[in-house]
Image (tube, grey):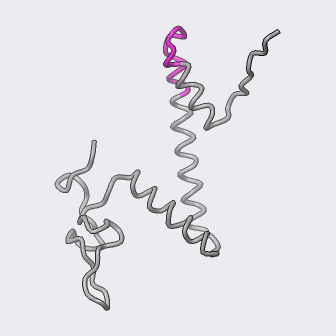
Amino acid sequence: MTPTASRAPSCSSCGGGGEVPTDFGPADCPDCGGAGYLPSRAVLVEWRARDIERALSAGSEPSAVDVRWLLAELRAARHALTDVIALAHDIQDGEAIAGRIRFTANRALGLYDVKTESSS
């Protein structure tokens, strides 16, 4: 499921060439990293998150566009994890992997209170 240059969409910023002109000569395209095609969505999300984090570390205030994007990503992730919990509930309860999936997704979502058994 890794994108290849033939299947991935061509970068519109550099026209698929991987370079953009600058005052100091050609440089790697910032949108595709010099590959000429767009990376996977996971990579793009990580790049944008790092850009926002870097800006915040430098003392910049987050823009409304960045906050809306982060909220959309948060909602999409929570929706996916909720689906994972629902699917794990459909698996036979005797399977240990189903329980692990439910607890892992719930740890991120916080949908259910987790109570530890106390030794009495």
Rendered view: 97 above or below 52? above
Report if residue 91 lies within the magenta region.
Answer: yes
The C terminus, quarter of image: top right
Residue visible at 16% across and 54% down in the picture = 6
Residue visible at 49% across and 19% down in the picture = 97
Q: Residue furthest bottom?
A: 23
Q: Residue furthest front?
A: 119
Q: Quadrant of residue 44?
A: bottom left
Dominant secondary structure of the magenta stretch? helix
Residue visible at 56% across and 64% down in the picture = 53
Could you say where residue 108 lies in the image, as x and y percent from the top left? 61, 38
Rendered view: 4 above or below 82? below
Could you say where residue 111 lies in the image, as x and y percent from the top left? 67, 32
Report if residue 87 lies within the magenta region.
Answer: yes
Front residue (pair 77, 53): 53
Could you say where residue 1 lies in the image, as x and y percent from the top left? 28, 41
Which residues fall within the magenta stretch? Answer: 85-98
Could you say where residue 20 lies in the image, as x and y percent from the top left? 27, 79
Q: Is residue 95 left or right of residue 16?
A: right
Q: Residue furthest left?
A: 6
Across the whole image, how many numbered discs are drawn on residues? Answer: 0
Residue visible at 50% across and 23% down in the picture = 87
Front residue (pair 10, 97): 97
